Image (spheres, grey):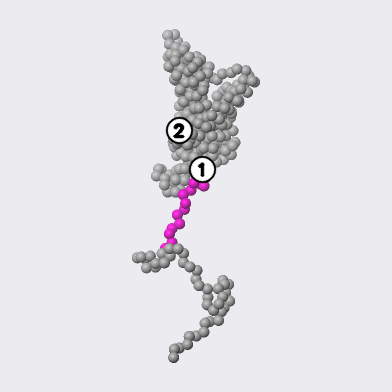
Amino acid sequence: MSEQLPPPPSPEPDSGGGGGSYPPPPPPPPPGAGLQPGWGGPAYPAPAYPPIPTPGEVESVLLYPAAPITLVEAVASEQAGAWTKKPLQVPTWGLGDVGITFAAWFFLSMVAGIAAFAITDGAGVSAALKGLITIIAVMIPWIGMGGWPLFAASIKGNGPSIDLGLRWSMRDIAWGLMYGVIALVTAIILGAVTTAIFGEFDSAAGDLGEQLSGNKLILLLFALTVGVGAPIIEEICFRGLTFSAIAKRGVAPWLTVIISAAIFSIFHLEPVRMILLLGIGLVLGFARWHTGSVTTTIVAHMMNNLPGAIFLLLS
């Protein structure tokens, strides 16, 4: 006769439930646990790699309110381990470099203006040569206005492409076309208001264009200077270095837009057009804040200057 099994143990109180004569069964193993060939034991859990951050989720000491999209994307790439260039650094350029930029522009403007006057004031200088020298004198100060921001970002930061938001992107160009239309509409409205207050007016570029109208080739070169060159240089200066230097100090983005637009307006030294220039500066500043790209503001600025450049050629 077979041996009789002992009775089950009496239940004991427990805090986790599972009453009855026997303790509750253990929880089921996680998926993938068990034996793996060649290991001879339970499988080790897979390492938990952090997800790749999106630009809106990136956190870093390198970033600041309204930082350029190029810097945000570079930081995200470095944090994800996909960055193959030299390690990113905290830029040391700032408002001091903005001051150097404007000081260099002013100094070069004075030197170029005096030199141009001395050369063209003599007898025997043709109108075409005078026009060419005048255009060169206009462009020489760009060495300070555009050159120093690029130089400062290169030696004190991560380069102008990353620190100043300069990149070739169809997204940025498309936004630039849209904001260019907005800037044009703003200029038309504020131009009408300015005319109603001060009467008919012209810009400094328009006055200079009239002086160069005797030679079509010189006039074409000047139109390209106004429609293409000036927007590139001014945006590198104002929405590139100046905007970023202000924002990097922790200033709220909306206030950064206003301050940079005011500097842009005052810089042109045209009191009658100051309200108009302030409106355009606000549109371009908001475009920089919205897209994080100076490429966008360059395209928008070109669109805003294009009608004036065409008018110079047709006149």
Q: Which residue is labeled 2 in the image?
A: 150
Q: Position of residue 266 (x, y in %)?
A: 57, 26
> Does the CB distance between marks 2 and 1 fall below 8 Å?
no
Marking on residue 28 = none
Relative vertical location of residue 286 with respect to residue 74 in this rendering, above or below: above
Residue 71, percent from left and from top: 48, 41
| Three-letter code for the amino acid on which mark 1 is drawn | Leu
Numbered-mark total? 2
Whether 55 is among the magenta residues is yes
Label 2: element kind = helix
Q: Residue furthest bottom?
A: 1
Q: Residue at x 52, y 21 (%)?
A: 308
Local secondary structure at mark 1: loop
Report the residue at 54% width, 37% height from top: 289
Give the mark, 2 or 1, whose residue is nearer the N terminus.
Answer: 1
- Amino acid on which the number 2 mark rests in the picture: Leu
Tell me the magenta residue range: 44-62
Residue 256 percent across, percent down from the top left: 57, 35
Read off the residue under disc 1.
63
- Residue 245 in magenta stretch: no
Crowding at mark 2 (Cα within 10 Å: few <14, some 14-19, many 20+): many
For this orientation, the residue located farthest to the front is 1
Direction top: furthest residue: 123
Q: Nearer the viewer, residue 124 or 45?
A: 45
Q: Locate the N terminus by quadrant.
A: bottom left
Q: Is residue 51 or residue 61 the one in the foreground?
A: 51
Crowdedness of circle 1 by 10 Å Cα count: few (<14), some, many (20+)?
Answer: some
Instruction: Decide if residue 102 is on the left or right side of residue 46.
Output: right
- On the image, which quarter does residue 250 sit in? top right
Q: Position of residue 251 (x, y in %)?
A: 58, 38
For the residue pair 28 and 232, the one nearer the viewer reads as 28
